[in-house]
Protein backbone atom coordinates (compact mmCIF):
# COMPACT_ATOMS: atom_id res chain seq x y z
CA UNK A 1 0.00 0.00 0.00
CA UNK A 2 1.14 3.51 -0.63
CA UNK A 3 1.91 6.23 1.85
CA UNK A 4 -1.08 8.13 0.52
CA UNK A 5 -3.40 5.45 1.82
CA UNK A 6 -1.49 4.90 5.09
CA UNK A 7 0.50 7.98 6.08
CA UNK A 8 3.35 7.75 8.52
CA UNK A 9 2.36 8.33 12.13
CA UNK A 10 2.25 12.02 13.04
CA UNK A 11 2.20 13.28 9.44
CA UNK A 12 -1.48 12.93 8.60
CA UNK A 13 -2.84 16.14 7.14
CA UNK A 14 0.49 17.96 7.46
CA UNK A 15 1.70 19.53 4.25
CA UNK A 16 5.43 19.12 3.84
CA UNK A 17 7.18 22.32 2.67
CA UNK A 18 8.76 22.20 -0.77
CA UNK A 19 12.49 22.05 -0.50
CA UNK A 20 14.60 24.01 -2.96
CA UNK A 21 16.23 21.92 -5.63
CA UNK A 22 19.82 22.26 -6.71
CA UNK A 23 20.62 24.01 -9.96
CA UNK A 24 20.20 21.63 -12.86
CA UNK A 25 20.57 21.79 -16.60
CA UNK A 26 16.85 22.56 -16.86
CA UNK A 27 16.99 25.56 -14.50
CA UNK A 28 19.94 26.76 -16.53
CA UNK A 29 17.41 27.57 -19.26
CA UNK A 30 15.98 30.35 -17.07
CA UNK A 31 19.44 31.82 -16.60
CA UNK A 32 19.96 31.50 -20.35
CA UNK A 33 16.61 33.22 -21.01
CA UNK A 34 17.55 36.04 -18.64
CA UNK A 35 20.91 36.56 -20.31
CA UNK A 36 19.44 36.45 -23.83
CA UNK A 37 16.64 38.83 -22.78
CA UNK A 38 19.19 41.33 -21.48
CA UNK A 39 21.25 40.91 -24.66
CA UNK A 40 18.25 41.29 -27.00
CA UNK A 41 17.12 44.29 -24.95
CA UNK A 42 20.51 45.93 -25.37
CA UNK A 43 20.39 45.21 -29.10
CA UNK A 44 16.97 46.85 -29.25
CA UNK A 45 18.19 49.87 -27.25
CA UNK A 46 21.07 50.35 -29.68
CA UNK A 47 18.70 49.94 -32.63
CA UNK A 48 16.44 52.64 -31.15
CA UNK A 49 19.33 55.01 -30.43
CA UNK A 50 20.66 54.63 -33.96
CA UNK A 51 17.20 55.41 -35.36
CA UNK A 52 17.05 58.57 -33.23
CA UNK A 53 20.61 59.80 -33.78
CA UNK A 54 21.54 58.83 -37.35
CA UNK A 55 18.54 59.20 -39.66
CA UNK A 56 20.50 57.99 -42.68
CA UNK A 57 21.68 54.68 -41.18
CA UNK A 58 18.52 52.75 -42.00
CA UNK A 59 17.49 52.50 -45.63
CA UNK A 60 13.77 53.09 -45.91
CA UNK A 61 12.06 52.15 -49.16
CA UNK A 62 9.74 54.45 -51.10
CA UNK A 63 6.70 53.09 -49.28
CA UNK A 64 8.21 54.10 -45.92
CA UNK A 65 7.93 52.30 -42.62
CA UNK A 66 4.87 50.56 -41.28
CA UNK A 67 2.74 52.65 -38.85
CA UNK A 68 5.38 55.05 -37.41
CA UNK A 69 8.11 57.31 -38.72
CA UNK A 70 11.76 56.46 -38.09
CA UNK A 71 11.73 58.66 -34.97
CA UNK A 72 8.64 56.87 -33.63
CA UNK A 73 10.26 53.49 -34.18
CA UNK A 74 13.42 54.76 -32.50
CA UNK A 75 11.53 55.72 -29.35
CA UNK A 76 9.53 52.50 -29.38
CA UNK A 77 12.67 50.36 -29.69
CA UNK A 78 14.42 52.38 -26.99
CA UNK A 79 11.57 51.98 -24.48
CA UNK A 80 10.97 48.29 -25.22
CA UNK A 81 14.71 47.60 -25.04
CA UNK A 82 15.12 49.25 -21.63
CA UNK A 83 12.09 47.37 -20.29
CA UNK A 84 13.46 44.10 -21.70
CA UNK A 85 16.83 44.66 -20.00
CA UNK A 86 15.09 45.32 -16.67
CA UNK A 87 12.83 42.28 -16.89
CA UNK A 88 15.76 40.12 -18.04
CA UNK A 89 17.65 41.13 -14.90
CA UNK A 90 14.54 40.45 -12.79
CA UNK A 91 14.23 37.03 -14.44
CA UNK A 92 17.35 35.94 -12.54
CA UNK A 93 15.35 36.19 -9.29
CA UNK A 94 12.83 33.59 -10.45
CA UNK A 95 9.87 35.88 -9.76
CA UNK A 96 6.58 34.98 -11.43
CA UNK A 97 5.95 38.57 -12.57
CA UNK A 98 9.37 38.64 -14.27
CA UNK A 99 8.51 35.53 -16.27
CA UNK A 100 5.16 36.96 -17.37
CA UNK A 101 6.68 40.34 -18.27
CA UNK A 102 9.56 38.69 -20.13
CA UNK A 103 7.21 36.63 -22.29
CA UNK A 104 5.00 39.68 -22.99
CA UNK A 105 7.92 41.96 -23.85
CA UNK A 106 9.68 39.35 -25.98
CA UNK A 107 6.45 38.80 -27.92
CA UNK A 108 5.90 42.53 -28.36
CA UNK A 109 9.53 43.04 -29.38
CA UNK A 110 9.26 40.26 -31.98
CA UNK A 111 6.15 41.91 -33.46
CA UNK A 112 7.85 45.32 -33.46
CA UNK A 113 10.89 43.85 -35.19
CA UNK A 114 8.58 42.22 -37.75
CA UNK A 115 7.02 45.59 -38.54
CA UNK A 116 10.51 47.18 -38.72
CA UNK A 117 11.89 44.53 -41.12
CA UNK A 118 11.69 46.82 -44.13
CA UNK A 119 14.38 49.05 -42.61
CA UNK A 120 16.73 46.40 -41.22
CA UNK A 121 15.72 42.90 -42.36
CA UNK A 122 18.62 40.65 -41.32
CA UNK A 123 19.10 42.12 -37.87
CA UNK A 124 15.35 42.14 -37.26
CA UNK A 125 15.16 38.44 -38.13
CA UNK A 126 17.99 37.68 -35.68
CA UNK A 127 16.26 39.55 -32.85
CA UNK A 128 12.95 37.80 -33.65
CA UNK A 129 14.71 34.43 -33.37
CA UNK A 130 16.22 35.43 -30.01
CA UNK A 131 12.81 36.56 -28.75
CA UNK A 132 11.18 33.28 -29.77
CA UNK A 133 13.96 31.35 -28.02
CA UNK A 134 13.42 33.38 -24.84
CA UNK A 135 9.66 32.79 -24.94
CA UNK A 136 10.22 29.05 -25.35
CA UNK A 137 12.75 28.86 -22.50
CA UNK A 138 10.58 30.80 -20.06
CA UNK A 139 7.34 29.00 -20.87
CA UNK A 140 8.79 25.49 -20.90
CA UNK A 141 11.19 25.83 -17.95
CA UNK A 142 9.80 28.83 -16.04
CA UNK A 143 8.36 26.94 -13.09
CA UNK A 144 11.74 25.49 -12.10
CA UNK A 145 13.31 28.89 -11.34
CA UNK A 146 11.23 29.48 -8.21
CA UNK A 147 12.95 26.62 -6.35
CA UNK A 148 16.51 27.28 -7.38
CA UNK A 149 19.30 27.68 -4.85
CA UNK A 150 21.53 30.68 -5.38
Image: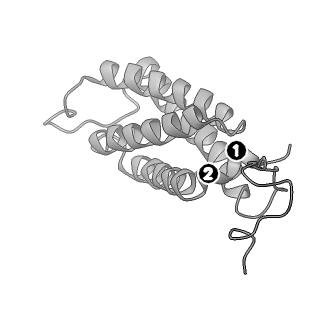
Q: Counting other residues with Cα less than 10 Å from the Cα at mark 2, is it few (<14), some (14-19), or many (20 or more)?
A: some
Q: Residue at 38% of width from left, 23% of height from top?
A: 76
Q: Quadrant of the N terminus?
A: bottom right
Tell me if residue 96 comes above or below residue 10 in the rendering: above
**Residue found at x 59% / y 41%:** 37
Q: Which residue is mark 2?
A: 143
The image position of residue 52, as x and y in percent, is 42, 19
Picture coordinates of residue 129, whole percent (x, y): 46, 55
Side of 71 relative to 81 (left or right)? left
Are there few (<14), some (14-19), or many (20+) residues within 10 Å of tag 1? some
Residue bearing the label numbered 1: 146
| Secondary structure of the residue carrying numbered label 2 | helix
Give the x, y percent position of residue 33. Answer: 62, 49
Q: Residue at x 72, y 36 (%)?
A: 93
Q: Which mark is residue 103?
A: none
Q: Residue at x 78, y 46 (%)?
A: 17
Q: For this rendering, which residue is in front, 7 or 143?
A: 7
Q: Quadrant of residue 46?
A: top right
Give SS at disc 1. helix
Q: Give 19 or 37, whichever is nearer the viewer.
A: 19
The residues bearing labels 2 and 1 have C-alpha atoms spaced at a distance of 6 Å
Amino acid sequence: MTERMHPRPGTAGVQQPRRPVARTRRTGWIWFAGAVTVLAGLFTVIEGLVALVDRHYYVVGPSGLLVFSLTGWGWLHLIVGVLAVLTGIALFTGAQWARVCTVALAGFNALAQLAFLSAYPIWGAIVIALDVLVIWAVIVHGDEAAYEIW
